Image (spheres, coloured by chain):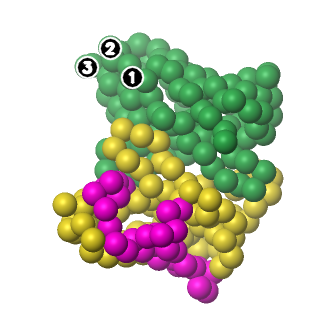
Amino acid sequence: EAGVAQSPRYKIIEKRQSVAFWCNPISGHATLYWYQQILGQGPKLLIQFQNNGVVDDSQLPKDRFSAERLKGVDSTLKIQPAKLEDSAVYLCASSWETGGRNTEAFFGQGTRLTVV
Amino acid sequence: GQQLNQSPQSMFIQEGEDVSMNCTSSSIFNTWLWYKQDPGEGPVLLIALYKAGELTSNGRLTAQFGITRKDSFLNISASIPSDVGIYFCALKTSYDKVIFGPGTSLSVIP
C-alpha cells in the first residue's frame, strides 16, 4: 500500500512570497490532516478534512493560510504571504473515515519550509 | 483546549537499558496513540490504545492506557541504537482530531 505522498520535500522562499504544498493521501482514506511542526515541538493541527469538507480549521491562520481538497482526494496548503515564523515542517496525514478503531493517522515525510 | 505533557523531555541511555516515558492530559480521552519520529521523516505510529487499563505490546515496546484515562506510558526494553528519535504521545478526540504532545527525545549511547 502506497503511503501519504507530499511534495516538495524542501522549499526556501523569501518573506512575503507565496508557497504551496501538495498532499496525496493513502487511497481510500476519507480524512486528511495538515500539521505544522516547528523545530523542537510536536505537530500542531492546522486543518482537518473529511472528504472535501472541513471538520476543524480552528488553528489555521486564515489571514495567510488556505487549504483545499476539492475532489475529496488530494489537497493543497497555501501560505500567502509567508512570514519568518512560518518556517517549519508541514506534515500531511490521512486516515480512514471517522469512528472506532483502525482510524489512526498515517503521515507523509513532510515539506520543510524555510522563510528567509 | 486540551493539554498534553510528556516526561522526560529528553533521555540519554546506554544501549541495552530499558526506557520508560509517560504522558498526561488535562482531560479524559478514549484513544491514546504513541508515535516515533526519525529525523527528516513524518511520525510513525507505534501503538494505539483504546481502553482504560489496556496494556499493548509491539516487539520491545509496551504501552499502557492509564485507569484514570488521563495518562499513558511507553516502555522500551533492551534499547538499541535505532531506537533513537523523538517519541510523541497523541490523543484522538471524538471527531478524530489528533493532538500531539511535545515529545520525548531519546538518545542511545552504544
Q: Which residues are magenta?
A: A60-89
Q: Residues within 10 Å of mark 1 (few under 14, many from 20)?
A: some
Judge by depth and name the residue closer to the eye, B71 or B52.
B71
Identify which residue is drawn at 53% across, 26% down.
B6
| Residue B7 coordinates in the image, percent (x, y) | 51, 21
Judge by depth and name the residue closer to the eye, B40 or B96.
B96
- Element at label 1: strand
Query: Which hue belongs to chain B?
Result: green
Chain of the residue where label 1 is placed in the rendered structure: B
Q: Residue furthest front?
A: A63
Residue A96 higher or lower than A104, as above or below: below
| Residue B58 coordinates in the image, percent (x, y) | 59, 34
Quarter of the image where one finds residue B48: top right
- Identify the residue position indicated by label 3 in the image: B110
Residue B10 marker: 1
Let me know if residue A81 is in the magenta part. yes
Identify which residue is drawn at 56% across, 57% down.
A59
Quarter of the image where one finds residue A116: bottom left
- Same chain, marks 1 and 3? yes
Q: Amino acid at mark 3?
A: Pro
Q: Amino acid at mark 2?
A: Gln
Residue B7 higher or lower than A68, as above or below: above
Residue B14 marker: 2
Q: Which chain is yellow?
A: A
